[in-house]
Image (cartoon, grey):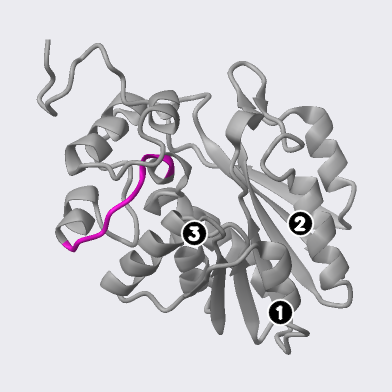
Amino acid sequence: MVSPAGHSAEQAYDRRFLLGNKRNELLALREVQQYGLDSFDDPDYVSIYGYKPHEWHALGVRILGRTAVECTPDQLGSLIGQDVAAVTRAAGAASPMVIDLFAGSGNTLHWIKQHTGARRAIGYELDAAVFELTRKNLSLVSLDVELRHDNYQHGLQMLGSPADDLLILFVAPPWGGALREGLGLDLRRTEPPVTEVIDVTTSIFSNHKLLFAAQVYETVEPGSLAELTARFPWSAIKVYDINAPGLNHGVLLATWGWTVT
C-alpha cells in the first residue's frame, strides 16, 4: 500500500525514522509533509520562518531529516517568543540581545528577536552541514539574524562583555537519548546536558543580567528539573497545548542576576 505522499504506508515518517534513516539527508517536500502527517496529523507542521513547507520549499529552503525533528516550528517558536518577551519587559531592558546557543534552523532565534525587539540576534551552530544549510536558508528568506559557525563556549567567550542590559539565551541542545517514551525528557542526558550549558554560560557572563529560555517537553524527569531550577533565583515553566496530549513542548524561563517581581 502506498500513501498519497508516495511512500509505503507501513513506513512511518516519525522521529525515530528521521533521526535514524534520514538523519543527514536532505528531505524532499513530500517527506517533510509526511513527517508532519505521521507524527502530528498535520502536513504543515514543519512551518518555519513564517512559511508553510510548500512555501519555504518553493523559495529554495532545504532541511535535513534531523532538522525537521529538532527544529522549533513557527507556532511553537512564536509562543516561546511571546513568553520570553513578557519576561523581558519585566526586566525593564531597553537594549536586549538574544543568543541561540544551538541554532539549528535558526527559527526560534528569529521568533524571539521578533517578539522581544532585540537589538541583535546571534546563533551558534557547530555542525558544518547544518550551519551551511541554515546560512543559505536565512539568506533566502532575508532574516536579520547572525549565524556563526562555532561552538557555544568559544562563541560566548569571543563576545567579550556585551553592553546590552539583558542577554536572552535560548538553550536547546540536541535531545538525543534524553527523550524516552514514558519517562519524558531528562535534562541531564541532552547533548550536552542543559545544566552544563547553564554553568558554562553563567561563568562567562557572571556579572550580566541573563534570561534563559530552555526548551522542554510536556513531561520532564523531576530530578533533572529540580537540579536545574535550583541554580536560579526565579524560574517558571510553560507547556503549550499545540499537539495531542503527551506530545507537547514547552519552555523553562529562568533569570540570573535578577528576579521577576
Q: Earlier in the sequence, mark 2 or mark 1?
A: 1
Query: On screen, 107 above or below 161?
Result: above
What amino acid is labelled 3 in the image?
A: Thr
Amino acid type at circle 2 is Ala
**In which quadrant is the C terminus drawn?**
bottom right
Q: Which mark is residue 108?
A: 3
The residue carrying mark 2 is: 254
Label whose residue precedes the other's in the sequence (3 or 1): 3
Type of residue at label 1?
Met
The quarter of the picture where residue 193 lies is top right
- The residue singled out by tag 1 in the image is 158
Q: Give the label, 3 or 1, closer to the camera.
A: 1
User: Which mark is on residue 235?
Assistant: none
**177 to 168, vertically: above or below:** above
Contact check, label 2 and label 1, Cβ < 8 Å: no
Residue sitting nearer the eye, 4 or 11: 11
Residue at the (84%, 56%) spot, across then down = 199
Label 2: which secondary element: strand
| Residue in the picture at 85% in, 37% down | 226
**For residue 34, which quarter of the picture?**
top left
Element type at mark 3:
helix
Considering only order in the chain, which callout, 2 or 3, is on the residue closer to the N terminus? 3
Quadrant location of the N terminus? top left
Q: Nearer the viewer, residue 129 or 239?
A: 129
Mark 3–mark 1 distance (CA, rounded to whole Å): 22 Å
Mark 1 Cα within 10 Å, few/some/many (few <14, many 20+)?
few
**Is residue 77 rendered magenta in the image?**
no
| Mark 3 residue crowding within 10 angstroms, few (<14) / some (14–19) / many (20+) | many
Give the x, y percent position of residue 125: 54, 61
Is 65 colored magenta in this rendering?
A: yes
Query: Which segment is the magenta one?
Result: 59-66
